[in-house]
Image (cartoon, helix red, strand yellow):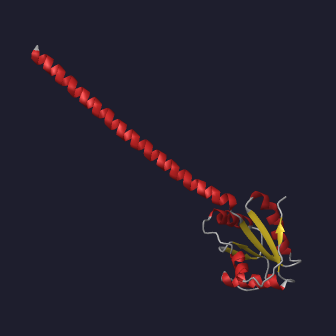
Amino acid sequence: MKSDAKIIIIGTAITLVVLILAIFLFYIFSTNYAKNKIVNENNNNSASDIENDVNTNKKVTLYLFRGLGCPHCEDAIEFLESIIDDYPYLEVQTLEVWRNKNNKKLMDIVSKKLDIEVSSSVPLIIIGDEYARRGFADGMENTIKNQIEKAYQSALYKDIVAEVLENNPDIQIHTEILSKN
C-alpha cells in the first residue's frame, strides 16, 4: 500500500506541477497577447487619428483658368458647380485669362512649372501638382472627381498654384470662388 500511496502522491504532485506550469504559461501568453493587441490598437488609432486630423483641416483647391464667353469653360463651371457640395474640402477658384493679363501670366508660369504647353487655350484645370488638363469634354467628369479624391487622400498633395503665387508676390490676380449651394 505504501508504494501505491507513493505513486498516487507522485502522480498528484506531477499533475499539480503540470497544471501550475500550464496556468503560468497561459498567463504569460495571454498577458503578452493583450499587451500586443493594445499596442497595435493604439498604433492603429494614432495613425488614423492623425490622418483624420490632417484630413479634417485639409483643403484641396481646383483652379479653372477660363476665358470669358468660352463655351467649354462654361460647361466646366456648370459641372464643378454640380459636384462642389459632394466634396466639403474642395475649393474651386476660377481665373479669367483672356482679359486679365495677371491671371494669364499666372497660367503661363504654372504651365511651365508643370511642363505643359504654354497656351491661351482654355479651360485649363489644375488640381495640386499632379493634374493639369486643357479643355473640357464629356467623359472627363469621373477623371476630375477621382483626381479631387486622390489629392485629398495624398499626403504629398501640393498646391502648385499657391506656391507660384507665394514665389511671385508681384502677380496680382483676380479669382472667383465657386460657392457651395
For the C terminus, give its image quadrant.
Answer: bottom right
For the N terminus, give its image quadrant.
Answer: top left
Q: Nearer the viewer, residue 72 or 159?
A: 159
Residue 15: quarter of image:
top left
* Above or below, comparing residue 34 to residue 122 in the picture: above
Residue 130: quarter of image:
bottom right
Residue at (63, 56) in percent of width and height:
52
Residue reaching furthest to the top: 1
Q: Position of residue 16 (x, y in %)?
A: 25, 27
* Above or below, comparing residue 58 to residue 126 in the picture: above
Residue at (32, 35) in percent of width and height:
24
- Is residue 162 visible in the rendered image? The answer is yes
Q: Nearer the viewer, residue 7 or 154?
A: 7
- Is residue 120 visible in the rendered image? The answer is no
In the picture provided, is 28 more to the left or to the right than 140?
left
Q: Position of residue 122 (x, y in %)?
A: 79, 79
In the picture provided, is 13 more to the left or to the right than 96?
left
Q: Position of residue 149 (x, y in %)?
A: 67, 62
* Above or below, comparing residue 128 to residue 6 in the picture: below
Residue at (13, 17) in percent of width and height:
4
Residue reaching furthest to the right: 69
Residue at (35, 36) in percent of width and height:
26
* Above or below, comparing residue 126 to residue 13 in the picture: below
In the picture provided, is 48 more to the left or to the right than 180?
left
Instruction: Tally the marks.
Output: 0
